[in-house]
Image: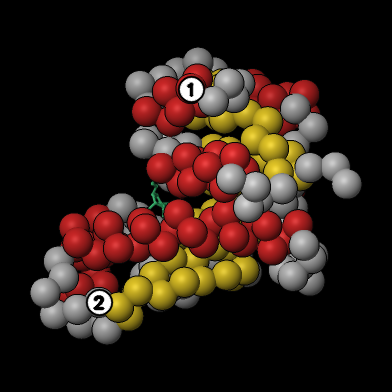
């Protein structure tokens, strides 16, 4: 069986990117990361790519000010690397519609809350965890979902919960959620490979 070919998109630290690298190395995930695409030339995820001999590409509106050429540059990288699945892991840019159409039901994202709660525009990073704490929710978690043209709207594929305790603040909750993200993302990709989660329903 051929390994599923993953293109990871990340803008900052890339700890989720690392969790996928590690799961592959440990034999828990039967996939190959064919490239990293980042919009941020200073991002630590580039170090992770270098350390693991993963080709990386810096594509942004600085490298490609023309939106048509920007989209084409991303599509070319995906095609050259025969990408099966796009894995958004802390990628802070909108995915152009042409790419969403070309990879329909083949783009995954991880969100640091239990969608459909605490999703949508403005719900990213610490904003999410602050909103969860403020609302008094007793449970939060992480969601892996398909990506369509609306923020955090695509079908939910998998979730993992964490307890929100009375002593939690946004920072402690963020760390708890990130810890489960690192388990949930590789697990979900492996479940797709095994046919336990279908992308084309
Ligand atoms: C994660 O919390 C993820 O849910 C969100 O962005 C963060 C990325 O973290 N989409 P990292 O770059 O993978 O460490």
72 displayed left or right of 118: right
Decide if residue 175 is in sight here: yes
Q: How is the image coloured?
A: secondary structure
Q: Earlier in the sequence, mark 1 or mark 2?
A: 1
Please tell me whether mark 1 or mark 2 is closer to you in this view.
1
Taking the view exactly as shown, the residue that stands out farthest to the left is: 167
Q: Which residue occupies 13% across, 80% down?
A: 166
Residue 39, above or below 13? above
Q: Which residue occupies 85% across, 42% down?
A: 2
Q: Are marks 1 and 2 in contact (CB under 8 Å)?
A: no
CB of mark 2 near ligand 1 (< 8 Å): no
Quadrant in which the C terminus is drawn: bottom right
Secondary structure of residue under mark 1 = helix
Q: Position of residue 118 (x, y in %)?
A: 36, 70
Q: Position of residue 122 (x, y in %)?
A: 33, 56
Q: Which residue occupies 68% across, 57% down?
A: 190
Decide if residue 100 is in sight here: no
Corner quadrant of residue 40:
top left
Kindly identify which residue carries mark 1: 51
Taking the view exactly as shown, the residue that stands out farthest to the top is: 63
Residue 21, above or below 152? above
179 displayed left or right of 150: left
Taking the view exactly as shown, the residue that stands out farthest to the right is: 1
Kindly identify which residue carries mark 2: 164
Front one among 82 and 18: 18
């Amino acid at each position: 069986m051929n390994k599923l070919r993953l293109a990871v998109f990340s803008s900052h630290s890339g700890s989720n990117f690392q969790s996928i690298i590690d799961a592959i190395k440990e034999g828990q995930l039967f996939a190959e990361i064919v490239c990293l695409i980042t919009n941020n030339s200073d991002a630590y995820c580039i170090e992770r790519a270098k350390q693991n001999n993963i080709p990386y590409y810096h594509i942004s509106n600085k490298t490609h000010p023309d939106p048509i050429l920007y989209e084409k540059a991303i599509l070319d990288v995906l095609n050259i690397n025969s990408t099966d699945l796009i894995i958004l892991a802390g990628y802070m840019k909108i995915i152009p519609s042409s790419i969403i159409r070309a990879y329909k039901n083949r783009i995954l994202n991880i969100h640091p809350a239990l969608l459909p709660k605490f999703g949508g525009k403005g719900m990213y990073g610490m904003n999410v965890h602050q909103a969860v704490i403020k609302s008094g929710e007793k449970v939060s978690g992480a969601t892996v979902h398909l990506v369509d043209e609306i923020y955090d709207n695509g079908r939910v594929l998998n979730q993992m919960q964490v307890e929100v305790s009375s002593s939690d603040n946004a920072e402690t909750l963020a760390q708890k959620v990130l810890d489960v993200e690192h388990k949930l993302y590789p697990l979900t990709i492996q479940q797709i490979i095994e046919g336990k989660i279908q992308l084309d329903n």
